Image (spheres, coloured by chain):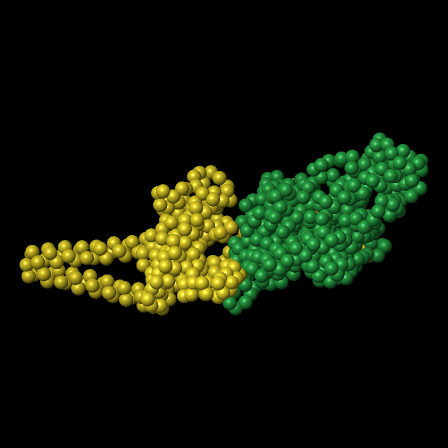
Chain colours: A yellow, B green
Amino acid sequence: MSATPQPRVILEDPAPPTERLDFGWETAVAVVPPPARGWSSLGLAGAGLTVLVLGFALLEAGNFVAAQFARGDALGWISLAVAIAGFGLLFAAIGREVRGYLALGTVDRARAAHARGDVAALRVALRDWQARLPPERPRAEGLADMPIDAACALVEARTLAPIGRDAESLGRAAAMQAFAVTAISPSPGLDALVFAWRGIRLVRQVAALHGFRPGIAGTLTLLRRVAADAATVAATDVAVEAVLRGVLSSRIAEHVAGETAAGAVAARRMILLARAADEACRVLPRG
Amino acid sequence: MDPFSLLRGMLDTTEDAARALIGRERLRLAVTGLSRAGKTVFLTSLIANLLAAGRGARTLPALDAAVGGRIRRVALVPAGTETVPRFDPDAHLGALAADPPHWPERTEDFSTLAIAIDVERRTSLGGLLPDRRVTLELLDYPGEWLLDLPMLRQDYADWSAATLTRMRRGTRAEAAADFLAFIDALPADAAAQDALAKRGFTLYRDALRVCRDEHGLRFLQPGRFLNPGPRGEAPLLWFFPLPAAAQGGGLGALCARRYAAYLDDQRTAFLDPYFTRFHRQVVLVDVLGALHAGQEAFEDTAEALAAVAAVVSGGNWLERLLGAAPTRVAFAATKADHVPTRARDALAALLEHLALGARGRAEAAGAATSFHALAAIRCTEDAVATLEGQPFAAVRGILLNEGRGATIYPGEVPMKPPEPAFWQSGFFRMPEFRPPRLDPEGASGVPHLGMDGLLAWLLGDAL
């Protein structure tokens, strides 16, 4: 034991001044981005099909217009005008679809920025999202000058919470309609059709509250997200639902309302759907 | 356990069960540690690294592996209580990252924080269900106050006898010479005069301060004498231990009354709300500091740990049944970056011996225990020091005040309580180091040693 030296401090030369140790921690723990998955086979096939259909349609139309010009100038100009109008409308529709689809990306960008604590990106995403909101919707002002926690809380209180309440109202209205239709409809098949149509309309209405105008592709994406969030919302309600259904549907509602009990369940699903759609469109995760 | 505590325990147990049913568990983590053990820095690092892990950074790899990479989000959430100040990790981190940097000041009051960890469910159908949310409730408080816990089981006469026995021993007797002379000179029937009570209190408090600051002793009671907290030195504190012979007079009765009132106050404000019910416990110990402070400080730390553990970890069968006793207790030797890598296992092993009494209490209460060596914020790197022509493993860091690089040979770290010859080397004061370069926003957490292993063991099964 005596051979062991005593503890001691050995000072280094004062120059050059040393500020801090740097372990390169930020690099060592940095988030590894998931590998890019690239295009799926289905995506490649779809893209190929689209190129073929559009490309050959354009070529065919070009050839047809050229042939019409060969027959006579008047015929040629009329054909050209028809082709331009038709393709113009088609491309306008495609453009609107793409814009509607890309707008949903704002939600993903904002949520990703929130999750990784990227303050600058979150501010940009919130600003873009607020710019897209319907003009009558109250907005949170002065977000750039406040800490990001306060900005998120203000967006939540000033904009997201009222949107959530409006979504609930839309859900209740849709629930009333679904209840009424299922109560009086002559066939279960028609029930399902009406329910599906009303559900899609409800999802689009809720998306519009958040400033999104999804087209077909956007709606399909939204429905997929809603399906994922519906599981979340529904599971959170599972205990309440079980009690409600146990007490109301089977005992009281079944006897009192008969077949309308099923309608009551369908109506409740509409309310859940509105909440799930609201969840899917929220620019910030619920606290 | 009185009927009200029993009722409250039953209600809390019911609430915990209901929360578990809907995937919203609450986990109260008691971070216990004697003063200067590093509780505040531990909590700052814990929070910064958990938040970074929630953003996907690999700051806590062992915890991530223990939970199978299921951590999805981590966020600060409002604590359940509104009356207690909020622990401010951003301010602490900002001070550590500032130029010049500052380590947190001595904690003067409680502060709480709750942190929500969203984890994917373990089951194969977990993807269809919402994420579970485990809310970790944390508390920071002055470490000195922890030693008020053992006093709850003593009356004034017992406490006076035990304290004076300790005070008349070793370096304490030297530090408390004035106080001991004062009480020995008191007549048996001293009157209940505030001037006498205050004089006794002042001498006793000064003796405790010398014991803490100059001799590295830790078993110093009552806690608020050393750290009075935001309410300052109220007359409630004007009492001190008296020999049995002097307890019969008015001054003895006054001291006994204030002793009871003090304990009542601490129980109501500090102990009952925070130390009667928690699920996990981490006990932080500055083993190296105790080792460098000499044999008496080392043994004193062990005694203090055992005394605290007897109250904190030792739930009775009813408390265990109600889930009011911790199921896992982790002991951690802090400031492990002050010794080279090869000595860290020895540090954990030494802690195991040091905390033998505390471990026995925890295990008797049915809790699992484990021992770790950690540095909540790593400030040094391994180096080699050439001493008397021989190379020795050492650490290198930047001294806090001087800003100069220094290589520190911390001496041998024995794996068990050292033999008497070891203590010949005398007192060694470890210098304070500058924290490494840190991001003041804490986006990537903070460099640490062993935090992830500790959290994996402590929380892994609950996530």
* Side (left or right) of B252 relative to A65: right
Residue located 41% across and 51% down the image: A169
Q: Is residue B42 above or below residue A184?
A: above
Q: Is residue B94 above or below residue B303?
A: above
Q: Quadrant of the C terminus of chain B?
A: bottom right
* Side (left or right) of A182 relative to B241: left
The image shows a total of numbered marks equal to 0
Please provide percent x and percent y for residue B215.
Answer: 80, 44
Q: In the image shown, does B243 or A77 lie closer to the viewer? A: B243
Q: In the image shown, does B337 or B318 lie closer to the viewer? A: B318
Q: Is residue B385 visible?
A: no
Q: Is residue B264 visible?
A: yes
Please provide percent x and percent y for residue A217.
Answer: 33, 59
* Side (left or right) of B115 relative to B347: left
Residue located 43% across and 49% down the image: A165
| Residue found at the far top of this picture | B195
Q: Quadrant of the N terminus of chain B?
A: bottom right
* Side (left or right) of B409 relative to B116: right
